[in-house]
Amino acid sequence: AQSVTQLGSHVSVSEGALVLLRCNYSSSVPPYLFWYVQYPNQGLQLLLKYTSAATLVKGINGFEAEFKKSETSFHLTKPSAHMSDAAEYFCAVSFLSQGNLIFGKGTKLSVKP
Amino acid sequence: EAGVAQSPRYKIIEKRQSVAFWCNPISGHATLYWYQQILGQGPKLLIQFQNNGVVDDSQLPKDRFSAERLKGVDSTLKIQPAKLEDSAVYLCASSPKPGQGAQKNIQYFGAGTRLSVL
């Protein structure tokens, strides 16, 4: 069965430090991959998506992610954390162009001043 | 462009009562999804509609949950009777019709309805 694993339910970084949120998936077919962000009491907002084009995907707010097929990974990075990046981040996969999303459990990012 | 609208934002009920949630997707979006997000977990799909037809309801607890999308636009999700374990945020999402370019794989989410069952 397809699944998504996010390593670390909580990540804490200092302002200005590198952000690295990990996501691994299991699938026998090439997936579509997504990162969503959720701020408190809000819905999910798309950060970026991979749909079999370039393996390095740039998203909003300075985030990017790299698809590595050999490692079945799609880790999210940002070179320099900002206080406004504090939120919960969800990695998700889809296996059909209009299929439902299968989400990881989420990683809560805290940014210390 | 208006986003996905959901109401109410919050609802508190007692177990065995019934409750209904409403969702209005982005105009023109053919596909509508309902997800359940339990505290500390990622969202889980309950049901997917394509226009007014059900595409996937395999994870919908049909003994107590029901959903409809009359006329292929807005949708309601109902729980009757509610159980304690139904306490969660219920998210509605929509996506464009297949074939509408790069947007077709993206789901747009509403703010959700937070349900507390006491």
Image (cartoon, rainbow, N blue to C red):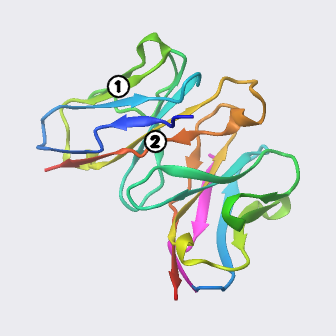
Q: Nearer the viewer, residue B102 or B47?
A: B102
> Alpha-carbon neighbours of circle 2 within 10 Å: few (<14), some, or many (≥20)?
many
For the residue marked with disc 1, what is the amino acid? Answer: Thr
Numbered label attached to residue B3: none
Q: Start and end of the magenta stretch?
A: A1-13
Q: Quadrant of residue B112?
A: top left
Residue depicted at 46% across the width and 27% down the height: B57
Pair 2/1: label in front: 2
Cα–Cα span, label 2 and label 1: 14 Å
Report if residue A96 is visible in the image.
Answer: no
Residue at mark 2: B110
Numbered label attached to residue B76: 1
For the residue marked with disc 2, what is the amino acid? Answer: Gly
Q: Quadrant of residue B95?
A: top right
- Does residue B18 appear left or right of residue A17 in this picture? left
**Label 2 SS:** loop
Q: Earlier in the sequence, mark 2 or mark 1?
A: 1
